[in-house]
Image (cartoon, helix red, strand yellow):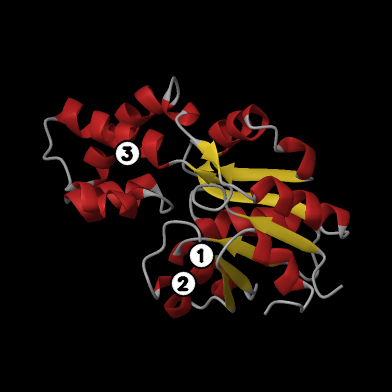
Amino acid sequence: MKFDWILLDLDGTLTDSAEGIKKSVRHALNRMGWPQPAEERMDDWIGPPLRDSFMMFCGMSAQQAETAISLYRERFSTIGWMENRVYEGVVDMLAGLRQAGYCLALATAKPLVFAQKIIPYFGLEQYLSHINGADLSGAKQTKVSVMQAVLSSTGAKHPLMIGDREDDARASVELGVPCLGAGWGYAKPGELEAAGCIHIAEKPSDVLEWIRGEYK
């Protein structure tokens, strides 16, 4: 096989988590008395680390961003993580990859404590041999650091990353890992190509076909 391990993003790749993330962001900003983003800009919050988003999109200082993250988690930890759904075709994609002999690992910039709730809640743990996510303490928060941890712990020799945002692709390029874009996620047109994805799968059912070299 060309690849041995397949690393998977969570938000926008396995699950459509927009509702819970957006509502929790708005909750945090409302608690801080901060202006609310326009609805058409809210998809930008899905994928990148929250700290970066609060600072970039709202102009917060690092200290203000930490406060916003705490308020975000106030809501997300109780209800926001459940305002989520598995994309159509994802379960079949995961089952097909496992049946084809690939080892699957979750590599998400979402805090690991939330990923460990979401994955079993939707019955996806049976497909994943390894789950890794960001650290609430701040020691491991970027996509690069999460992917490095996965590669180190799995011993992957020929990994493939599958993700839906430029952060996934850029981290993959930095680490020398090919990235397959999840075209059904939250990326804007052209975002994944510009960030370095080697191919864009338009739907989950395209993934295994492309990996096998049968993509049309």
Q: Residues within 10 Å of mark 2 (few under 14, many from 20)?
A: many
Q: Which residue is mark 3?
A: 22
* 138 or 20, nearer to the observer: 20
Give yes or no for contact between labels 3 and 2 (Cβ–Cβ under 8 Å): no
Q: Which residue is mark 1?
A: 183
Q: Disc 1 on helix, strand or loop?
A: loop
**Is 29 on the left-hand or right-hand side of 87?**
left
Q: Which residue is mark 2?
A: 192
**Is 182 on the left-hand or right-hand side of 194?**
right
Furthest residue in direction top, as rendered: 78
Measuring 73% from the left and 49% from the top, which residue is drawn there?
92
Give yes or no for contact between labels 1 and 3 (Cβ–Cβ under 8 Å): no
Q: Quadrant of residue 197?
A: bottom right
Measuring 50% from the left and 59% from the top, which residue is drawn there?
184
Q: Residues within 10 Å of mark 1 (few under 14, many from 20)?
A: many
Looking at the rendered structure, the kind of residue marked 1 is Gly
Measuring 43% from the left and 52% from the top, which residue is drawn there?
47
Q: Mark yes or no: residue 158 visible.
A: yes
Q: Quadrant of residue 181?
A: bottom right
Looking at the rendered structure, the kind of residue marked 3 is Lys
Between disc 1 and disc 3, whose residue precedes? 3
Give yes or no for contact between labels 1 and 2 (Cβ–Cβ under 8 Å): yes
